[in-house]
Amino acid sequence: MPTRHASALWNGSLQQGTGMMSTGSGVLKAPFDTGSRLGDKGGTNPDELIGAAHAGCFSMALSMLLGEIGIDNPEINSDADVTIEQTDGGLAITGIALRTRVKAKGISEDEFQDVAKAAKDNCPVSKALAGTKITLSAELETAA
């Protein structure tokens, strides 16, 4: 398995500084600062990128698990809300709320919920974030 690379450059103080995050693939090169992380200023931030990575990883895991039980070509639409809060130990990501809406045929609601939970528990990003409370809301729509 390959090792992936990302980097960040930060210049200045926490409040006045600015940074640039980038991925080794070159797909992302994005500015960030304290305002984009803790305020309403536009731009990205590390927490948002964790959410995107988690939603993507979960969707891939769910697709794999659905395929293993014969559910081919599902449409999976997932998102993640990442909560960052001040704690006694400083700023911390305290929760991630995953939501997914799936169009598929040939699966019962109970079986779907079991598979979605397994995907949440076993995707590599969920495992990396094991110290964070991760919740899941999974909605199944029967495909035509």
Image (cartoon, rainbow, N blue to C red):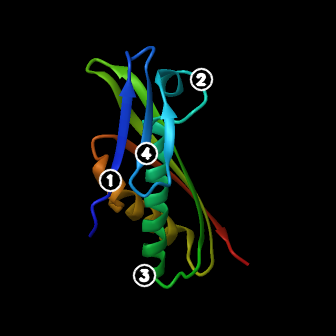
Q: In this image, 65 relative to 90: left or right? A: right
Q: Earlier in the sequence, mark 3 or mark 1?
A: 1
The amino acid type, in three-letter code, at marker 2 is Asp
Q: Which residue is mark 3?
A: 68
Residue at the spot of label 1: 5
Structural crowding at the residue carrying mark 1, measured as other residues with C-alpha within 10 Å and reported as few (<14), some (14–19) or many (≥20)? few
Q: SS class of the residue under badge 4?
A: strand
Q: Up-down: is 75 above or below 37?
A: below
State if disc 2 and disc 3 touch (CB < 8 Å).
no
Measure the alpha-carbon separation of dots 3 and 2.
Answer: 42 Å
- Separation of disc 3 and disc 1 at Cα? 30 Å
Amino acid type, label 3: Glu
Mark 2 vs 1: CB contact within 8 A: no
Circle 2 residues within 10 Å: few <14, some 14–19, many ≥20: few
Q: Which residue is mark 2?
A: 40
Q: Which residue is at 33% across, 61% downward?
A: 122
What residue do we see at 35% from left, 43% from top?
7
Residue 97 seen by the camera: no
Distance in Å between CA atoms under marks 2 and 1: 28 Å
Of the residues under marks 3 and 4, which one precedes in the sequence?
4
Location of residue 89 by image quarter: top left
Q: Give the structural element (helix, strand or loop) at label 2.
A: loop
Q: Are dots 1 and 4 in contact, CB under 8 Å?
A: no
As rendered, which of 96 and 3 lies closer to the eye?
Answer: 3
Q: Secondary structure at mark 3?
A: helix
Which residue in the protein does label 4 denote?
A: 22
Query: Amino acid type of disc 1?
Result: His
Residue lying at 45% horizontally and 14% vertically, measured from the top left:
16
Pick the quarter of the image with the C terminus.
bottom right
Q: Are the residues tagged 3 and 4 within 8 Å (C-beta)? A: no
